[in-house]
Amino acid sequence: MTELTIIQNTTHPPAPQEHHARVRLLASRATLAKRRWRGVAEDGREFGFDLDETPSHGAHFFIDGAKRYVLEQAPEEVLEIPVATMEQAARIAWSLGNLHFGVQVLAGGVRVMEDPAVLQLLSREGIAFKRVNCVFLPLSAGAHHHHDHSPHHHGS
């Protein structure tokens, strides 16, 4: 029986040292959206997560001897819409956001989860897309919040 290591925060440990081997714990986007879950790292070590905030892709969460454990989001199939300009990207992202779908905006495209409503919009507007398997990191509702903790910030 393996020991379960409980993780209560995913604050980044000190900068990695050359002697730390990177050990991945792969989890779905849905799992990473939870605060309480269990997962097994690629070396077989089992972790239980009981977090105040949801972790993000690439978060380092544990160091044990020469091993540094990192969370990685599993790739998933999504739709990628190629765009030529940022104006085009903004228009497509706005249309998809208006349907309440999270989008990931890239330099050359916009990614979104496949859904009948999305497919209908793309078809109606004649917008080309392709299916790609990748780590999907949509903009979150909280992504635009900025918390200034400097001593000179007093709010308005």
Image (cartoon, grey):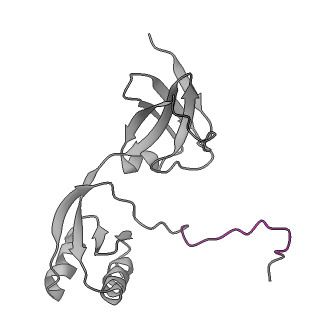
Where's residue 10, x and y in %? 58, 42
Considering the whole magenta stretch, tell me its main secondary structure: loop
**Camera-nearest residue between 107 and 57:** 107
Where's residue 101, x and y in %? 36, 71
Number of labels in the image equals 0
- Tell me which corner region of the image, top left, top right, bottom left or bottom right, holds residue 120: bottom left
Q: Say which quadrant the N terminus sits in.
A: top left
The answer to whether 72 is drawn above or below residue 6 in the figure is below
Where's residue 130, x and y in %? 15, 68
Residue in view at x 38 percent, y 41 percent:
27
The answer to whether 144 is drawn above or below residue 4 in the figure is below
Residue in view at x 80 percent, y 83 percent:
156
**Camera-nearest residue between 13 and 135:** 13
Q: Residue furthest top?
A: 1
Where's residue 107, x and y in %? 34, 75
- Tell me which corner region of the image, top left, top right, bottom left or bottom right, holds residue 13: top right
Q: Is residue 97 rendered to the left or right of residue 53?
A: left
**Camera-nearest residue between 115 and 23:** 23
Residue in view at x 64 percent, y 40 percent:
14
Q: Is residue 41 rendered to the left or right of residue 147?
A: left
**Camera-nearest residue between 48 and 74:** 74
- Tell me which corner region of the image, top left, top right, bottom left or bottom right, holds residue 149: bottom right
Magenta-drawn segment: 143-153
The answer to whether 84 is drawn above or below residue 117 in the figure is below
Q: Is residue 70 rendered to the left or right of residue 114?
A: right
Question: Would residue 152 be counted in the magenta stretch?
Answer: yes
Q: Residue furthest front?
A: 18
The answer to whether 10 is drawn above or below residue 141 in the figure is above
Question: Would residue 100 be counted in the magenta stretch?
Answer: no
